[in-house]
């Protein structure tokens, strides 16, 4: 896992070798880290807390994408659309059926997962680019449905409905400083789940069908079954993330950034972080979110300097920054930041001797 | 179904399909020579249209740098776009040779974002309605057709002209691929890179050339599209329907791309003849529903080779 270890520090038992947390000081680091995260709304500024909230939510969605793209090797261009499904589901069941928030998150994940299964069905017959096109179809059809069907329920052509502020045990989570905890807790749960999926029979089946589907089938992995499972998990997590985002933004709709560009950005986050690693989503999302904020600041600074050209600077900096960084990563470090961290760890282990 | 509207929509759909077909042709061209799915083709189309508009004297602040007639602006834009195609191949796609499919798809997606932003920063975000189109939208030809709505089919002249140009361009490219030496080299490369290299074809140069030609096709498509809709950043998103078109026709087939384009145009127009309002509004997603059906029933497309890997 993601821990620095000095030279000469070896695992002596199988349990140690397999363990996620292997040394007392790692428990200490984990505890201190959690303490910092839990107290963050007390000491960090508003920008830091709301950015952390955004990062947590996106990490959940990208973790799902990682299962599908990184581990199972299927290509999906529709993750943002599944977030939209989750957001709508949660907003609707909380306001119309007054379902408690944690249950609504679960329902959002399930509904989104089932719709993900539907669009995963073509994976029975096609793969690669063809599958990418099937998920691209999802990315266009789902927002269309929300704009054209059941206008009373889904907001109609305006394309947005409001989502309630979650209230659990009488505590309102309207403030971002409070909402942060909901995202954090959900993220911890999904991280443990994803970690366990990737280390268990399921995850190894995913990896085997990514690396060689024929060999995997010979070993008894039912390809169609496992591909659908990957689709379900990916859209489940997208749905949960979408629900979290909907209640955090107090609304959900096609206008609020659930388009093809978002799906592409999530794929980009995954590649920049590192495909098929559990650390990747964290690194990639953090990097890209900070990059986009930087681009936003740069854009608005330029817009202030050249007020007549404001519109073009405000809209163009994000895609340029993101596209350029993604292309540079693909050329120079296609294994992502997680691989950088791996090489750094290896270098640290051998530190006094060799590089 | 509102049968009175069907003849009109058939005609409009076929004409629109011509433009989609010419855009799809550019994507198939790059796929055939280098097995890259170019998701940034829509952005190339948009840039081609913007460049033509710029060379023809369109600017933001009224200070014209060029003021050429359309027949002068289009060749200039074509030259610039061919150069851009070469540049993209050399800088972005050449380093990706041998990388997995996902990396290459993401490369073209990243490129699409970059080109989107670049176009916004150079040409501004507002839609331009002063594209020097040779026809105005109100110029129409009325063809008497008994049984149609008001017993007449109305064809916009601009649409008719673009469809004719699209057909001519498609024929020129078909001849180019069938009979010229470079076209032959490209087809050989698409069959087998090693064998092509064996008979003395410079494979990297063929890749570069095919990107340059894709830039040219994109410019032609962009100018045709701009004649009908005007120039704006959203041209890139409009052209995404070219992807269902090429999958309908089969990835490797030029004629398939053209027929797929026509089918997509027809599907988009025909749903508008429906008497149910929801179906009428579905012309944006009709191509994708068609695509899903094709993927499940006949994944290799109508004219594609049955080489697709099944699992």
Image: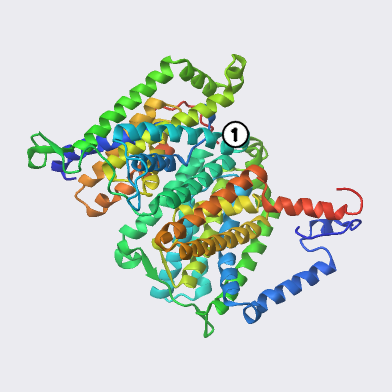
**Residue B275 location, x and y as percent?**
19, 50
Where's the C terminus of chain B, which quadrant?
top right
**Image quadrant in which you'd find residue A312:** bottom left
**Residue at x 75% of width, y 74% of height:** A32
**Residue at x 25% of width, y 45% of height:** B271
**Residue A87 location, x and y as percent?**
46, 65
**Residue at x 35% of width, y 22% of height:** B172
Question: Considering depth in this image, is A246 or B195 the residue closer to the camera?
Answer: B195
In this orientation, does residue A219 appear?
A: yes
For residue A220, side relative to residue B20 (left or right):
right
Where's the N terminus of chain B, which quadrant?
top left
Question: Considering depth in this image, is B115 or A283 the residue closer to the camera?
Answer: B115
For residue A339, side relative to residue A97 (left or right):
right
Neighbours of disc 1 within 10 Å: few (<14), some (14-19), many (20+): some
Question: Considering depth in this image, is A345 or A25 the residue closer to the camera?
Answer: A345
Numbered marks: total: 1
**Residue B108 location, x and y as percent?**
52, 42
Under circle 1, the secondary element is helix
In this orientation, does residue A114 appear?
A: no
For residue A3, side relative to residue A50 (left or right):
right
Residue tagged by mark 1?
A: B94
B161 relative to B189, above or below: below
**Residue at x 49% of width, y 21% of height:** B187
Dot 1: chain letter? B
**Residue A299 location, x and y as percent?**
50, 61
A230 relative to B105, above or below: below
């Amino acid at each position: 896992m993601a821990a620095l270890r000095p030279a000469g520090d070896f695992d002596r038992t199988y349990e140690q070798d397999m363990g996620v947390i292997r040394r007392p000081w790692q428990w200490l680091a984990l505890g201190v880290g959690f303490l910092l995260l839990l107290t963050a709304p007390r000491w960090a500024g508003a920008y830091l807390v709301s950015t952390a909230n955004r990062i947590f939510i996106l990490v959940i969605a990208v973790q799902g994408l990682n299962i599908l793209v990184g581990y199972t090797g299927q290509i999906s261009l529709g993750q943002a659309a599944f977030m939209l499904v989750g957001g709508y589901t949660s907003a609707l069941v909380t306001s119309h059926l007054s379902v408690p928030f944690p249950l609504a998150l679960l329902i959002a994940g399930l509904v989104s997962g089932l719709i993900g299964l539907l669009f995963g069905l073509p994976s029975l017959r096609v793969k690669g680019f063809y599958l990418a096109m099937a998920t691209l179809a999802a990315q266009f059809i789902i927002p269309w449905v929300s704009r054209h069907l059941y206008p009373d329920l889904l907001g109609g052509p305006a394309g947005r409905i409001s989502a309630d502020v979650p209230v659990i045990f009488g505590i309102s989570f309207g403030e971002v400083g409070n909402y942060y905890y909901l995202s954090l807790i959900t993220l911890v749960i999904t991280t443990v789940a994803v970690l366990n999926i990737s280390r268990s029979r399921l995850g190894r089946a995913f990896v085997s069908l990514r690396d060689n589907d024929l060999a995997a089938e010979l070993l008894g992995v039912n390809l169609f079954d496992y591909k659908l499972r990957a689709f379900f998990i990916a859209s489940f997590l997208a749905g949960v993330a979408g629900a979290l985002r909907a209640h955090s933004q107090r609304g959900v709709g096609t206008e609020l950034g659930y388009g093809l560009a978002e799906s592409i950005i999530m794929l980009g986050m995954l590649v920049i972080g590192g495909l098929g690693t559990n650390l990747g989503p964290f690194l990639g999302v953090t990097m890209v979110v900070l990059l986009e904020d930087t681009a936003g600041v740069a854009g608005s600074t330029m817009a202030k300097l050249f007020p007549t050209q404001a519109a073009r600077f405000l809209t163009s900096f994000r895609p340029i920054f993101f596209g350029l960084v993604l292309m540079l990563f693909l050329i120079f470090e296609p294994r992502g930041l997680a691989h950088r961290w791996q090489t750094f760890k290896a270098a640290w282990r051998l530190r006094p001797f060799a590089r | 179904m509102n049968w009175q509207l069907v003849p009109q929509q058939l005609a409009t759909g076929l004409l629109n399909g011509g433009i989609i077909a010419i855009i799809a042709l550019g994507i198939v061209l790059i796929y055939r020579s280098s097995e890259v799915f170019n998701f940034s083709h829509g952005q190339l189309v948009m840039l081609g249209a913007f460049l033509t508009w710029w060379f023809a004297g369109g600017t933001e602040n009224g200070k014209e740098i060029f003021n050429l007639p359309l027949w002068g602006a289009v060749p200039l834009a074509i030259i610039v776009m061919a150069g851009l195609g070469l540049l993209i191949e050399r800088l972005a796609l050449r380093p990706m040779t041998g990388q997995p499919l996902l990396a290459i798809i993401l490369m073209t997606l990243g490129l699409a974002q970059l080109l989107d932003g670049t176009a916004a920063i150079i040409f501004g975000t507002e839609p331009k309605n002063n594209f020097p189109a040779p026809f105005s939208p109100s110029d129409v030809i009325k063809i008497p057709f008994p049984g149609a709505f008001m017993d007449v089919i109305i064809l916009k002249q601009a649409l008719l002209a673009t469809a004719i140009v699209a057909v001519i361009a498609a024929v020129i490219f078909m001849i180019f691929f069938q009979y010229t030496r470079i076209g032959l080299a490209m087809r050989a490369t698409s069959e087998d890179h090693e064998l092509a290299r064996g008979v003395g074809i410079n494979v990297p140069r063929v890749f570069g050339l095919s990107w340059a030609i894709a830039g040219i096709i994109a410019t032609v498509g962009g100018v045709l599209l701009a004649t009908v809709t005007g120039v704006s950043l959203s041209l890139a998103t409009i052209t995404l329907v070219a992807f269902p078109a090429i999958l309908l026709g089969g990835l490797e087939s030029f004629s398939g791309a053209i027929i797929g384009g026509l089918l997509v145009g027809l599907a988009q127009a025909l749903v508008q003849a429906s008497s149910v309002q929801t179906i009428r509004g579905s012309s944006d997603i009709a191509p994708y529903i068609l695509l899903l059906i094709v993927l499940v029933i006949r994944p290799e497309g109508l004219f594609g080779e049955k080489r697709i890997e099944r699992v």
